[in-house]
């Protein structure tokens, strides 16, 4: 089938030093293909500035960007993260490709898509540079951020707050010599797509741990620095996994998938090694490896799930005080981290598009 490629951009998002943005997905429309009913077969994205230049994470931290249309439900975690496409800081190095012959099909070309874009500009922060950057990126509480001490480590402390009105200037604390002018940033994303009828329908969803939560926090532990969050899901319908790719934050070790207690695969992070180089930012998580992809290896068996199987998701982080992988960013505990497994799959035809076939039954 013929595959088309199109690149789109979000609206400009002005940010001053220390400022953050967390767009409302229902109020942030984004362009998508509209010439004919289509099926998306791959995507990638990154953050750029007003000059179309790729921006390093040390200037603007790409916490996440997600896209979805109205009516979508994540049937792998009904109460968990809700998105069709998207990713975080590793975005520009972690493209997603659907296996040959499959795509996310969209019959209605007038369907409205929206974006939740979460960015934090971490230049000119107050205090020790790298500690201040960590606290800003991990949604620590601070005066002037529009949140309360009990909101420490939550999205409320980095943009998702009823206190943040359009004309307000809430921010991470900045130094006295910080400039006050804003700079425009945008999400740029590239889609591969084909005609609707050229491919079989693939579904998408996200498993998340602990217990389908959107994020969680882990305290410093020098005695047992490798910490795991684990959630077990009960499967109620037969399905086939086509693609699985993990999403984690700074401090991650890996995120792994098990079926009936048998290891299937893991996604591993790669950390950057060069200061302020877009795509290889020192101390930042800049890429996640693919956990599973159908037909990626001819010797790899296909991955089927059956009714009454159990899927386990293990998300590992290092929270010892000394973590050289992320230097010069400080080690220790991490707040507002994620343990996601983005998954492309097929399921029985009679299964409702918005009813769960995976239910979390235990989490630790």
Image (tube, helix red, strand yellow):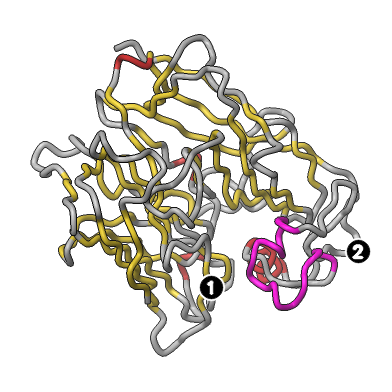
The residue lying furthest to the bottom in this view is 223
Disc number placed over residue 176 in the picture, else none: 2
Identity of the residue drawn at 39% across and 22% down: 39
Label 1 Cα neighbours within 10 Å, binned few <14 / some 14-19 / many ≥20: some
- Find disc 1 in the rendering and name its residue: 217
Residue 155 within the segment the image draws in magenta = yes
| Residue 235 falls left or right of residue 46 | left
- Dividing the image into 4 quarters, which one contains the C terminus? bottom left
Q: Magenta residues, as a range? A: 144-161
Closer mark to the observer between disc 2 and disc 1: 1
| Residue 296 falls left or right of residue 34 | left
Tell me residue 120's x, y (percent): 70, 53
Residue 90 within the segment the image draws in magenta = no
Tell me the element at label 1. Answer: strand
- Position of residue 238 relative to residue 110, above or below, is below
The residue lying furthest to the left in this view is 299
Identity of the residue drawn at 75% across and 55% down: 123
Identity of the residue drawn at 15% across and 63% down: 262
Tell me residue 166's x, y (percent): 85, 46
Among the 4 quarters of the image, the one containing residue 223? bottom left
Among the 4 quarters of the image, the one containing residue 156? bottom right
């Amino acid at each position: 089938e013929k595959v088309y490629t199109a690149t789109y951009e979000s609206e400009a998002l002005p940010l001053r030093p220390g400022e953050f943005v967390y767009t409302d997905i229902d109020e942030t429309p984004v362009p998508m293909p509209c010439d004919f009913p289509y099926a998306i077969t791959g995507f990638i994205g990154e953050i750029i500035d007003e000059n179309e230049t790729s921006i390093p994470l040390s200037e603007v931290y790409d916490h996440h960007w997600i896209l979805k249309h109205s009516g979508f439900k994540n049937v792998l975690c009904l109460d968990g993260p809700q998105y069709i496409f998207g990713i975080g800081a590793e975005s520009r190095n972690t493209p997603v490709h659907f296996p040959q012959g499959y795509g996310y099909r969209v019959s209605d070309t007038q369907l409205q898509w929206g974006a939740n874009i979460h960015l934090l500009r971490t230049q000119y922060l107050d205090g020790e540079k790298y500690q201040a950057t960590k606290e800003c990126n991990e949604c620590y509480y601070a005066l002037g951020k529009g949140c309360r001490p009990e909101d420490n480590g939550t999205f409320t402390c980095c943009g998702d707050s009823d206190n943040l009105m359009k004309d307000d200037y809430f921010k991470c604390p900045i130094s006295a010599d910080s400039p006050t002018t804003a700079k425009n940033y945008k999400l740029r994303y590239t889609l591969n797509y084909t005609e609707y009828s050229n491919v079989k329908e693939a579904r998408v969803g996200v498993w998340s741990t602990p217990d389908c939560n959107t994020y969680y926090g882990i305290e410093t532990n020098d005695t047992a620095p490798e910490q795991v969050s684990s959630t077990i899901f009960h499967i109620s319908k037969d399905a086939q996994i086509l693609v699985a790719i993990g999403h984690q934050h700074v401090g991650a070790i890996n995120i792994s998938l098990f079926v009936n207690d048998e290891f299937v695969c893991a996604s591993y992070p790669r950390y950057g090694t060069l200061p302020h180089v877009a795509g290889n930012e020192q101390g930042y998580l800049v890429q996640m490896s693919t956990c599973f992809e159908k037909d990626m290896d001819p010797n790899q068996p296909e991955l089927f799930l059956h009714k009454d199987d159990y899927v386990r998701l293990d998300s590992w982080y290092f929270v010892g005080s000394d973590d050289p992988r992320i230097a010069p960013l400080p080690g220790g505990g991490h707040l507002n981290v994620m343990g996601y497994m983005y998954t492309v799959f097929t399921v029985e035809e009679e299964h409702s598009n918005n009813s769960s076939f995976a239910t979390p039954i235990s989490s630790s």
